[in-house]
Image: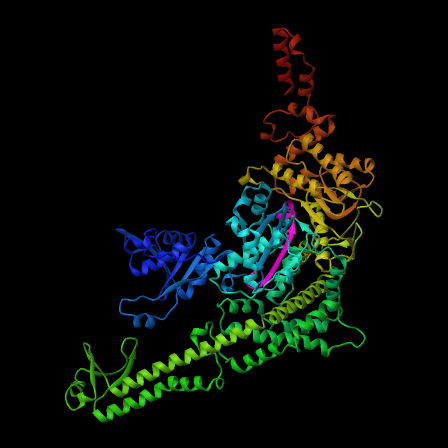
């Protein structure tokens, strides 16, 4: 979308027409162009916010709200933040869900003064900061992606497009409307652009809520095919989109939404974007949001990275490598040859430990070239970003050189590594070689963060710059010489000083200055200012020198800025090979890092094929094992064998065992092995064979969704319904304690029916953990069902968990013993044992629960002992058959027995 037209400040429809000052008129103009954003309005060294913007920002940032001047007879609410610390405040506002429009001063105040005394500095919107368009290091997580996504639906087909603006990566894929949730979950966007009419679609709306990013409604007109195609052509500077492949109408619409958003937020700056990489729904494993949260693939359920699969296996040494590893885990592949290419690279590094260590050491110097390039392309970069490109290209070439030095004549590197090495050494690219020479010769040693600070061009590069610097830097010596001359000529003790108002001036004490105010010295010393104890003068020579020094500093900075712009343009010219080199370094980093992790934990190469097998021997949970090892303990490995065809093992395994025995760990462990293997990593096992899993489903753990009016049981049933309706014969399903949130018989019936459906209808590989031991009989009723159990033993009244999975059902759940281990009060545990004993003794136990005495749990259970003589005599009495006299006699006899 084109940037909105600037409103006329004199238009009666704008607030500026109501007698605003010129500066406030500029603010109103900016606000009218971005009415839903907070306007950061640059005034000197601060960004100021006014009116409602100030009230919102002050509350979100915890800063003071003040007032400045008046508008329409009312004080103007105002708050501000220092320009040098603006990034930290921006980050806080973005996290709080705000958009921020940055209105900068776009000319020097001296230029404004040339137009007249009452002229004000020109200001304009230079960008709109939203969650998905961040590029600054201070606003981004170095090892995490920050993606802007867009959703479009045309002709019943949905598409998701995404851009990582900080690196220039662009992707798109087509899917069904039902597949949107999984597609968005795989991307993990920070911001999602959606045509406003799609909010009425319940399926799309549910997918957006599950996507987790900030949802930005867009006018439907922006998603129309013709307009989207035109914006996409402008974004890439092409005449046709044919070079991007056969993009569907929905893909063009989604990419067009992104192009519209970038045109608005980047104020016409063209980012350095790669061509859209098209993905198919059949290219990656589908993992819905609930499953991702349950398995803690990229984030733990606490929301942090620690405790996730990604944190457990990440041994990368660069931020781009960490982001690539996260992307691979988020979207495991479905094509065995493509998976094998990744595994070949990991195996190569596993077999060559010395080369792996040298490569990792070299890659540490690569830096984050893709993000540096993006900042330069958008006009937000500085000299240090150029240095990042300079050092990154050199470090990448050095890393590639290690392979040449260690070349094995009869063994070529695997394809994944060979392609990366070629991208890191673009010897045939004359432009990239010239760019490197330019930076090698031109960049200085001490580099400022911003080009406007100067001092980054090396001496000898621009002779005119050296001359301007000499005059600027030698000013102290020249001024000292002139001071000595004036003092000698006048015979007065004086000093030459400088301030921002007067520039250079001669200063003497009031008594010493008296001769300077009288002829003949008054002809040389021109009076400027009288202070309480000093008098200030200038001379013609000093005024001329002041002008030359000021001009020299300004000229030196202008030359440096001109040089920086030339270098920035050169970087944009070679953006494609730089992006390729950055991606290549990340791929080497991921392969070497996975090999490092595999060596650390004893992981092996999986066999991934097109069968429907799942064969794990001696497998371990990668996250839990890491935690156990840190505690100094050993993890108990387990086997698991499934076969969708039912030939090499059961299609469905019913998993039983005590609470705390490790059923949930066992289930998650096997699901994570599939993710790791198809992502191209080794797996912690003795042996692992996997037939590719097209969809992975996990229903493990309890959780409600109160915001949507769903209880724990309802949320469980919604997720179960999605599994039963979407799982295919190539899917892997893990279910934990389905039916536990309702009445016993209802839960058992639901669990039974779900197990049958998975086996007979979905025909997928599955692990079904339950405490309904009645389900064990399914092994004899269904052709491809088997029982597994996690073992435990009782020893001297205590429960010992073995964490071993073996064939056959568990004999009991040991719930009371687990309650004891959890610290439930002994009297409650004892009462629970009593109730359990009674229920287990009596047939049809649930029907007799009402016979249990009310409030019995409030009293400690009686100790069991042999009946006393009094109790025996009392039991022999028949109160209903006694006369009053006989009852009195019996009472005295009982009293006599007590002695």
Spot occupied by residue 375 in the image (x, y as percentages of width and height) = 52, 67
Spot occupied by residue 498 in the image (x, y as percentages of width and height) = 29, 80
Residue at the farthest bottom position: 489
Residue at the farthest right position: 647
State the residue in front, 324 or 30.
30
Q: Image quarter for residue 86?
A: bottom left
171 in the magenta segment? yes
341 in the magenta segment? no
User: Residue at image x 37%, y 69%?
Assistant: 107
Q: With 695 as the anchor, is 806 left or right in this view?
A: right
Q: With 194 as the anchor, is 729 left or right in this view?
A: right
Q: With 707 as the anchor, is 766 left or right in this view?
A: right
- Whether 823 is drawn above or below 428: the answer is above
Spot occupied by residue 656 in the image (x, y as percentages of width and height) = 74, 41
Q: Image quarter for residue 501?
A: bottom left
- Whether 436 is drawn above or below 726: the answer is below
Q: Is residue 825 visible?
A: no
Q: Image quarter for residue 188?
A: bottom right
Q: With 443 as the anchor, is 694 left or right in this view?
A: right
User: Residue at image x 65%, y 33%?
Assistant: 832
Quarter of the image with the C terminus is: top right
Q: What stretch is highlighted in magenta?
A: 164-180
**Image color mode:** rainbow
Spot occupied by residue 194 in the image (x, y as percentages of width and height) = 54, 49
- Whether 807 is drawn above or below 636: the answer is above
């Amino acid at each position: 979308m084109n940037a909105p037209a600037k409103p006329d400040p004199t238009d009666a429809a704008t607030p500026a027409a109501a007698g605003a000052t010129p500066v406030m008129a500029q603010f109103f103009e900016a606000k009218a162009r971005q009415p839903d954003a907070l306007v950061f309005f640059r005034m000197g060294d601060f960004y100021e916010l006014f009116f409602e913007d100030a009230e919102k920002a002050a509350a979100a940032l915890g800063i003071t709200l003040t007032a400045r001047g008046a508008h329409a007879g009312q004080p103007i609410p105002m708050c501000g933040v220092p320009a040098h610390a603006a990034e930290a405040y921006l980050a806080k506002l973005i996290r709080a869900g705000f958009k921020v429009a940055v209105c900068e001063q776009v000319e020097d105040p001296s230029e404004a003064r040339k137009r007249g005394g009452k002229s004000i500095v020109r200001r304009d919107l230079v960008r709109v900061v939203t969650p998905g368009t961040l590029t600054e290091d201070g606003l981004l997580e170095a090892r995490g992606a920050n993606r802007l996504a867009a959703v479009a639906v045309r002709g019943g087909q949905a598409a998701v497009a995404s851009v990582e603006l900080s690196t220039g990566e662009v992707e798109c894929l087509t899917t069904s409307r039902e597949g949107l949730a999984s597609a968005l979950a795989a991307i993990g966007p920070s911001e999602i652009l959606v045509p406003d009419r799609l909010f009425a679609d319940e399926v799309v709306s549910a997918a957006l809520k599950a996507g987790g990013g900030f949802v930005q409604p867009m006018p439907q007109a922006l998603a129309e095919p013709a307009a989207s195609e035109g914006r996409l052509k402008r974004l890439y500077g092409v005449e046709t989109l044919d070079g991007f492949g056969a993009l569907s109408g929905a893909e063009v619409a989604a990419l067009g939404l992104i192009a519209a958003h970038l045109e608005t937020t980047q104020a016409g700056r063209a980012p350095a974007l790669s061509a859209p990489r098209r993905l198919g729904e059949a290219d990656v494993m589908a993992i819905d949001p609930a499953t991702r949260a349950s398995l803690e693939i990229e984030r733990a359920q606490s929301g942090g990275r620690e405790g996730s699969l990604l944190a457990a296996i990440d041994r990368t040494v660069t931020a781009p490598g960490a982001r690539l590893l996260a992307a691979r885990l988020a979207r495991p592949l479905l094509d065995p040859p493509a998976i094998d290419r990744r595994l070949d690279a990991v195996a190569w590094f596993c077999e060559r430990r010395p080369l792996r260590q040298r490569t990792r050491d070299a890659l540490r110097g690569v830096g984050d070239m893709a993000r540096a390039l993006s900042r330069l392309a958008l006009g937000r970069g500085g000299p240090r970003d150029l240095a990042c490109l300079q050092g990154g290209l050199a470090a990448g070439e050095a890393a590639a050189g290690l392979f040449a030095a260690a070349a094995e004549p009869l063994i070529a590197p695997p394809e994944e590594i060979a392609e990366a090495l070629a991208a890191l050494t673009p010897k045939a690219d004359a432009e990239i070689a010239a760019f490197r020479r330019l930076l090698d010769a031109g960049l200085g040693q001490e580099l400022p963060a911003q080009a406007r600070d100067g001092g980054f061009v090396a001496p000898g590069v621009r002779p005119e710059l050296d001359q301007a610097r000499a005059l600027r830097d030698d000013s102290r010596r020249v001024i000292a010489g002139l001071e000595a001359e004036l003092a000698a000529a006048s015979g007065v003790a004086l000093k030459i000083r400088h301030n921002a108002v007067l520039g250079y001036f001669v200063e003497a004490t009031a008594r010493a200055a008296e001769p300077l105010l009288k002829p003949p010295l008054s002809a040389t010393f021109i009076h400027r200012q009288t202070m309480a104890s000093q008098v200030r003068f200038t001379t013609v020579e000093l005024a001329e020198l002041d002008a030359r020094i000021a001009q020299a500093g300004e000229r030196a900075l202008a030359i440096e800025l001109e040089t920086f712009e030339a270098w920035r343009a050169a970087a944009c010219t070679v953006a494609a090979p730089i992006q390729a080199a950055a991606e290549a370094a990340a791929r080497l980093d991921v392969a070497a890092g996975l090999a490092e992790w595999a060596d650390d934990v004893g992981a092996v190469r999986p066999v991934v094929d097109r069968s429907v097998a799942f064969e794990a021997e001696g497998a371990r949970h990668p996250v839990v094992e890491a935690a156990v090892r840190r505690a100094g303990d050993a993890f108990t490995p387990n086997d698991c064998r499934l076969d969708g065809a039912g030939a090499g093992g059961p299609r469905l395994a019913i998993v039983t065992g005590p609470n705390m025995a490790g059923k949930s760990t066992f289930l998650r462990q096997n699901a994570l092995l599939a993710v790791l293997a198809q992502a191209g990593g080794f797996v912690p096992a003795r042996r692992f064979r996997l037939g590719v899993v097209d969809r992975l489903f996990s229903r493990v753990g309890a959780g409600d969704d109160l915001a949507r009016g769903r209880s724990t049981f309802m949320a469980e049933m919604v997720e179960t319904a999605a599994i039963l309706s979407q799982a295919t014969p190539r899917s892997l399903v893990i279910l934990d304690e389905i039916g536990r949130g309702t009445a016993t018989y209802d839960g058992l019936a639901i669990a039974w029916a779900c197990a049958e459906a998975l086996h007979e209808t979905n025909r997928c590989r599955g692990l079904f953990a339950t405490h309904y031991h009645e389900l064990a009989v399914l092994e004899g009723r269904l052709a491809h069902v088997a029982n597994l159990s996690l073992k435990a033993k009782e020893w001297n009244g205590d429960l010992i968990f073995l964490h071993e999975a073996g064939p056959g059902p568990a004999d009991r759940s040991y719930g009371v013993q687990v309650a004891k281990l959890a610290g439930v009060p002994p009297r409650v545990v004892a009462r629970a044992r009593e109730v359990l004993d009674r229920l287990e003794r009596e047939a049809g136990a649930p029907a007799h629960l009402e016979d249990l005495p009310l409030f019995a749990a409030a009293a400690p259970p009686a100790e069991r002992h042999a009946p006393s003589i009094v109790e025996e005599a009392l039991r022999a009495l028949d109160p209903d058959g006694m006369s009053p006299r006989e009852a009195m006699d019996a009472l005295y006899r009982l009293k006599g027995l007590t002695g």
